[in-house]
Amino acid sequence: MDWTWLSLLEADDYTIAREVLQRGVAAIYGLAFLSTYHQFPALLGERGLTPAPRFLARTRGRDAPTLFRLLPYGDRLLRTICAVGMALAVAVIAGLSQLGPPWLPLLAFLAMWGLYLSIVNVGQRFYGFGWETLLLEAGFVVALLGSPEVAPPLPILLFLRWLVFRLEFGAGMIKMRGDPAWRDLTAMDYHHQTQPMPNPLSRWAHRKPAWWHRAEALGSHAVQLVVPWLLFLPQPVASIAACLIILTQLYLVLTGNYAWLNWLTILLAFSAISDSFLRALLGGPWEAALAFPIELGDPRSPAWWTVLVALVFLVLLGLSAAPLRNLCSKDQRMNASFNRLHLVNAYGAFGSMTKQRRELVIEGSIDPDPGEDDWRAYEFRGKPGDPRRMPRQFAPYHLHLDWLLWFAALGRWREPWFNRLLEHLLEGDPAILRLLRTDPFEGRAPAVIRVRVFEYRFASARERRETGLWWLREELGTLLRARHSTRGTNT
């Protein structure tokens, strides 16, 4: 049988893209497992804020498949899974799995995907962010890029571009359908100050003039609504489009903390960048970067591998129907999964722009009847607290608790996990205290705690010179007080 036609499914000009995608996505998986290793037991472990064993007891396996239904959950087992995941990630980063046949990196990525899927499916609110499902989808698809023994498969590279399209275009449409501030180009007047977790350059970006913020909003619309379509055009247009996406993502990296969302988007955009284009950027001939007619030749990849890739590609295309309908819907969902395996998802961010920054400041006192001078604040690693403290850079590392505290300040403090957080602070829980930046009581359990609400804003240049403060804040009131008793926490 003549298998020459299979060469149409090969993309020999994307070997660099394959290396970037495989090693880069594996690095993000390693970071995700590391974050889980340190934070999951305190947040969702046996004595966590929303324990995974309780979640497993009240849900069905068909709704949330996870290894923890086969092996009873334990914090030691969770950490073992994370250690295995990190070891697999290191093997791919070092190129060890790519030294063998194409099924070897396939197995490595599917193992990382399966292990992390088991975590996300019991992660509840703490793992409900868009970058979790993005990492799962990316890992599953990148698994099919194979090893250097086969040519990079064109269908998989095209599907990765479709993933970038859903990611960028979905975010653009959710903005246009959402807050009017995006349509009148004023959204960036607020964004840098009110984003969930500012970084050291966020204040610099916020203090830029109005025309700068209009240009930011307009540039966001152009890159998210127009540029993604160019990913599917011939070279070098697709590579140029990918570079534009990468540049905007780097700007977001410089001005905010969005876990691995921006870095993963940068890696996925490489699916559209050809080897010839990269060589041309380094001084090679531009003629080589131009699209050329496909010539049939002997396929480099074995038929079984090409057929496997084609079949999985067709399955993924079938799963694309739901997110495609979502993109076209006026009731577009943001960061939604349409199947329990978290494959071919919907993405988006900031459909509603927060215009004031509110922060919950949790304070405690050893004195059961404290005066105003007896209160001491718990400081978290990423979220603003002490007005004198410069925001830090944590991304691509993900601080699960700090992110949820931003949502709590928007009115979600009534969720069960927040009340449990206060209980654990009153108990002086060492696991929770290790997640904080500072514990004002050095491990001792306070007699009482309170939660105050403040409105924060960045200090102007004059205010910073005069006070040395990064933030100025105004108290809006006390949300609640809680004290520990023999019958539990009284609020």
Image (cartoon, grey):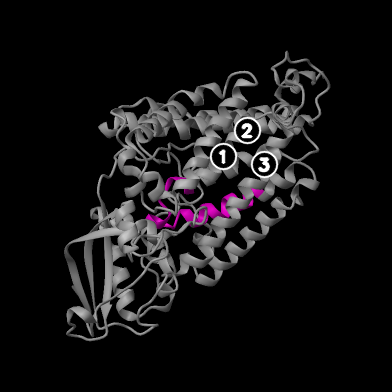
Instruction: Inspect the image, locate mark 1, and give the three-letter code of the amino acid beneath it.
Output: Ile
Question: Residue 2: x percent and y percent?
Answer: 82, 18
Q: CA distance from mark 2 to mark 1?
A: 10 Å
Q: Is residue 262 above or below residue 395?
A: above
Residue at 58% of width from left, 37% of height from top?
A: 268
* Label located before the other in sequence (2 or 1): 1
Which of the pair 245/110 is nearer the observer? 245
The residue at which mark 2 appears reads as 271
From the viewer's perspective, is residue 169 above or below residue 381?
above
Q: Is 375 situated above or below 175? A: below
- Quadrant of image for the N terminus: top right
Q: Amino acid at mark 3?
A: Val
Magenta span dominant secondary structure = helix
Amino acid of disc 2: Ser
Check disc 1 and report the residue beneath it.
Answer: 266
- Range of residues picked out in magenta: 109-133
Decide whether residue 121 is among the magenta residues: yes
Lower sequence index among marks 3 and 2 = 3
Contact, CB < 8 Å: mark 3 with mark 1? no
Left or right: residue 457 compared with residue 131: left
Secondary structure of the residue carrying numbered label 2:
helix
For the residue pair 76 and 64, the one nearer the viewer reads as: 76
Report, in whole angstroms, how far the alpha carbon at label 3 lies from the one at label 1.
10 Å
